[in-house]
Amino acid sequence: MSVQTEKSFLIDLLQNINDASIIQKVKNFVLHEIEPNILTENQKKELDIRILERQENPASGVNAMDFLDSIKSKYEL
């Protein structure tokens, strides 16, 4: 299966998930199977800033499904 096909399949799968156990399985895979990268201090600071901004304004940000749709369109999946 090509990488492009895998991306398309994964995006379609994530868009149609209604079962919390599937989401948990994907999360566990990402957390345990993909090699972690060491963040620089600047990256850690940026993440902390984003977390604080989100906590202060929970309605801000992009809807996850809208984000996936934009990726799908951008990469013509």
Image (cartoon, helix red, strand yellow):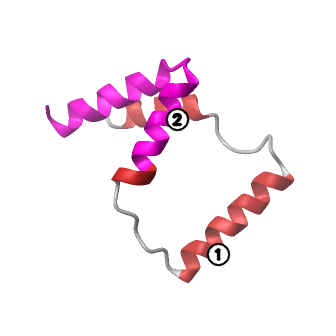
Query: What whole-number distance in Å separates the C-alpha atoms at marks 1 and 2?
Result: 27 Å
Q: Position of residue 58 (x, y in %)?
A: 80, 44
Q: What crowding class fits label 1: few (fewer than 14 Cα within 10 Å), some (14-19), or many (20 or more)?
A: few
Q: Position of residue 45 (x, y in %)?
A: 64, 75
Q: Position of residue 5 (x, y in %)?
A: 22, 30
Q: Residue at x 63, y 65 (%)?
A: 47
Residue range corresponding to the magenta coloring: 1-30
On the question of residue 76 being in view, the answer is no
Residue 51 in the image: above or below residue 23: below
Q: Position of residue 20 (x, y in %)?
A: 57, 25
Magenta residue check for 3: yes
Q: What crowding class fits label 2: few (fewer than 14 Cα within 10 Å), some (14-19), or many (20 or more)?
A: few
Residue 39 in the image: above or below residue 31: below
The answer to whether residue 45 is left or right of residue 57 is left
- The residue beneath circle 2 is 24
Helix, strand or loop for the magenta stretch, by majority = helix
Along the line of sight, which residue is nearer the eye, 3 or 18? Answer: 18
Label 2's element?
helix
Q: Residue at x 44, y 74 (%)?
A: 38
Q: Which residue is the extreme one toward the left?
A: 1
